[in-house]
Image (tube, rainbow, N blue to C red):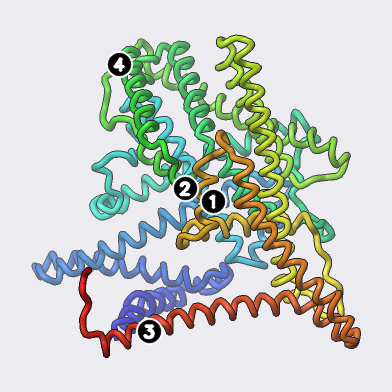
Amino acid sequence: SLNTLFILVFAFCPYHIGHFSLVGLGFEEHVQASHFEGLITTIVGYILLAITLIICHGLATLVKFHRSRRLLGVCYIVVKVSLLVVVEIGVFPLICGWWLDICSLEMFDATLKDRELSFQSAPGTTMFLHWLVGMVYVFYFASFILLLREVLRPGVLWFLRNLNDPDFNPVQEMIHLPIYRHLRRFILSVIVFGSIVLLMLWLPIRIIKSLLPNFLPYNVMLYSDAPVSELSLELLLLQVVLPALLEQGHTRQWLKGLVRAWTVTAGYLLDLHSYLLGDQEENENSANQQVNNNQHARNNNAIPVVGEGLHAAHQAILQQGGPVGFQPYRRPLNFPLRIFLLIVFMCITLLIASLICLTLPVFAGRWLMSFWTGTAKIHELYTAACGLYVCWLTIRAVTVLVAWMPQGRRVIFQKVKEWSLMIMKTLIVAVLLAGVVPLLLGLLFELVIVAPLRVPLDQTPLFYPWQDWALGVLHAKIIAAITLMGPQWWLKTVIEQVYANGIRNIDLHYIIRKLAAPVISVLLLSLCVPYVIASGVVPLLGVTAEMQNLVHRRIYPFLLMVVVLMGILSFQVRQFKRLYEHIKNDKYLVGQRLV
């Protein structure tokens, strides 16, 4: 009855209120054309409920019904907060996602008509993908603002809410601030985010089109005969390439260093140093103190925690805010004009940075890939990822060399020798753990699950090693994550040990003996034993060709089923033994004595 009441109050009533009002106003056809009839109708119902509650609250105040006034007020607050949450978390990222898509249409040589067609063919997926893109954009924008707070003087970004402020409570703000303030803030956010997308996406694309007419569009169209599916590639990029770049602590430090250098330059050029960074001495002292604290924290946390990776980075992003509050500064002459020039300088910098990010990695990637594939068109995800890694490695090598330069030639040669050995070891491990294991895993998955489901018995399944490898990487990642979350057993211990050693102290012998050899043996056995049975043993029994084909095609799923059944049975036997012991002890155990 509680569930029924809940559905009645929170779903049935708002939906029908919205439905009747939409029918009454004659908007029914427009809503049906949107493909999200139920959702929009319910939200309209909630908005009407909120308006009704406000009116009733006003009437109750007039006639001095205090108890009903309180009840109506609480109900209105519940509806208001839920609507605001829907707007902040649902509508705003969706607007950002669509705006990003519209501004980047020329980059992929697409038109609004294409987007309309894809929306009509799969409205839910299209909306979800746009929401996801918008959410990622908003998240990284917020992370960048937090990075700025660490560099700039406290009080420069007074107009942006500080997420690190201990007094900042979003729900309380939603309750206390009136609707028009929320509306004003929402419109302002849309304008700021929208104009940044225009500045960093639409304008650079126009400039690239006019300066390098042959550079765009990016090649992201994959034809049906291409052996690699777009999905597996994008998953690979999101799962492997981006986290690898983001989890490098250096990338964040470089970004922070660049922001600091830019701020110092702008401060000296426009005489806004005091406004942007506060007074220098104090800043340097706090920076030194921060470095010492960081060193101290690193020494304390000598043992790395497994699997903290990106989550830890995000936690650090959220926890590393500068001091909350305000720091006084010196105002130079013509202050408003200088601030205006600062904003113009910032816009130009962002535009140039965006141009470099859009062209350099892809240009480098295309140039490198042309040695390998010639003139064939390659999916731009490959070229961009390849170019990004090359740029990252180049910058890393330069920074390392600059750090080593003062130590003399012999030390450099020694270091180069150590690093070469380490790179060789890493390459061997990478070939085994990121090449052979994912390929075998992907192939096994294809044989056990994909081929039996997709290919009829009278057709031959085709295997694309490249695609199997791409999906195998994902499977390997998921299996490793599940292993690390699960109970203690040999594989978990080995993976934890490898993680703890890291790349610097890589132990090739241990990895091959304890991890690569057992895993590859199990996978090879899983692939070879069924094949030997189907191709070598079954024909000797003198069965028909159809039967041979059936065995050949169905032996992998059959063996998987056998293994799963064996696992379930052994688990049940253990459970029954425990239950038996429990009943026996319950009934006959007289007492236990501590010896």
At a point 47% along the width and 27% down the height, the residue shown is 256
Image quadrant holding the C terminus, namely bottom left
For disc 3, the marked residue is: 579
Cα–Cα span, label 3 and label 2: 36 Å
Q: Does label 4 or label 3 sit earlier along the sequence?
A: 4
Cα–Cα span, label 3 and label 1: 34 Å
Point out residue 305 in the picture as x, y percentages from the top left corner.
43, 45
Point out residue 433 in the picture as x, y percentages from the top left corner.
66, 49
Cα–Cα span, label 2 and label 1: 9 Å
Amino acid tagged 2: Val
Q: Nearer the viewer, mark 3 or mark 2?
A: 3
Callout 3 secondary element? helix
For disc 4, the marked residue is: 282
Residue 474 falls in which quadrant of the image? bottom right
Q: Are marks 1 and 4 in contact (CB under 8 Å)?
A: no
Q: Residues within 10 Å of mark 3 (few under 14, many from 20)?
A: few
Q: Residues within 10 Å of mark 1 (few under 14, many from 20)?
A: some
At a point 51% along the width and 72% down the height, the residue shown is 37
Cα–Cα span, label 2 and label 4: 37 Å
For disc 2, the marked residue is: 306
Callout 2 secondary element? loop
Q: Does label 2 or label 4 sit earlier along the sequence?
A: 4
Asked if residue 237 lies left or right of residue 483, the reply is right
Callout 4 secondary element? helix
